[in-house]
Amino acid sequence: MSAVSASPAAQGPGRGVPADPVRALPHALYWAAKADPGRRFHALYDKIRRRDVLWRAWAAVRRNNGAPGIDKITLAQVEEYGIDRLPGELASELREGRYRPLPARRVYIPKPGTTEQRPLSIPPVRDRIVQAAVKIVLEPVFEADFLPCSFGFRPERSQQDALQVLVDECARGRRWVVETDIASCFSAIPHEKLMQAVQERVCDQPVLKLLRAGVMEDGQLRRPVTGTPQGNTA
């Protein structure tokens, strides 16, 4: 299946709407954003805190099979505690305004082909669940704004899909490819500018607060003003 045929836009309004309420939610948000490019969404927090959304988020986190955060709680311990209990508790904390994310655990791994090290931020499992729920709700809103020629980090789009575009363009007679790279791209992204871009579509303040969290490194809590964490959610 190609990336285009798998996308909500390829199905058209009123077609391919899933019966699953959690799968239907991104579909509805995508089309609401697509229908009005200037719309700013102000009622998203209630969707993130839904228990069924949080349970689906847990399933995504479990599939990713990541390491524990600074609280040292593993995925196996969460399963032992009860996979129905934790999403319910998170839903209550979010609903009552008691949810507070812990700092992510900062680790460094070798960067392939170089002597450099790549920083990874590993939040606790409970925070990864909330982050995955945020992704379920926010991703379709911004997905509606991306151009068809964009492939990086988008759902249902892979390197193979991008390569197929090159093959197709070559068949049409194109002969040049321009390759560019931004040095330390992820670590250089300014938080203020990034949040300004997010707020062009989202004005729900409780949701915006969920996007901010510190990093624990060498026993010190840091709140950097640049960079986006890599390797933190499903």
Image (cartoon, rainbow, N blue to C red):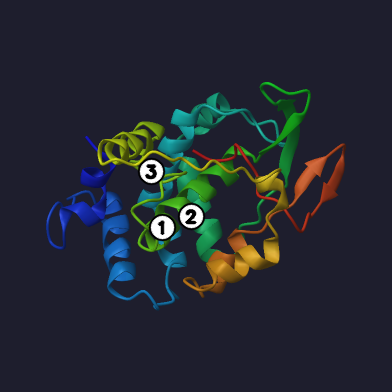
Mark 2 highlights which residue? Answer: 134
Looking at the image, residue 10 sits to the left or right of residue 149; the answer is: left
Q: Is residue 129 left or right of residue 26?
A: right
Q: Report if the CB atoms under discs 2 and 1 are less than 8 Å apart.
A: yes
Q: Residues within 10 Å of mark 3 (few under 14, many from 20)?
A: some
Residue at x 25% of width, y 53% of height = 8
Residue at figure coordinates x 47%, y 71% from the top left: 201
Q: Amino acid at mark 3?
A: Arg
Which mark identifies residue 137? 1
Q: Is residue 182 above or below residue 234?
A: below
Q: CA distance from mark 3 to mark 2?
A: 11 Å
- Residue nearest the viewer, comparing 36 with 46: 36
Position of residue 177 measured from the top left corner of the image (x, y, whole percent): 46, 40
Q: Nearer the viewer, mark 3 or mark 1?
A: 1
Q: Say few, some or many: other residues with alpha carbon within 10 Å of mark 2 (under 14 / 14 to 19 / 20 or more).
A: many
Q: Quadrant of residue 205?
A: bottom right
Mark 1: amino acid: Val
Q: Position of residue 112 (x, y in %)?
A: 66, 22
Mark 3 = which residue?
56
Name the image quarter holding the N terminus: top left
Q: Mark yes or no: residue 17 visible.
A: no
CA–CA distance between discs 2 and 1? 5 Å
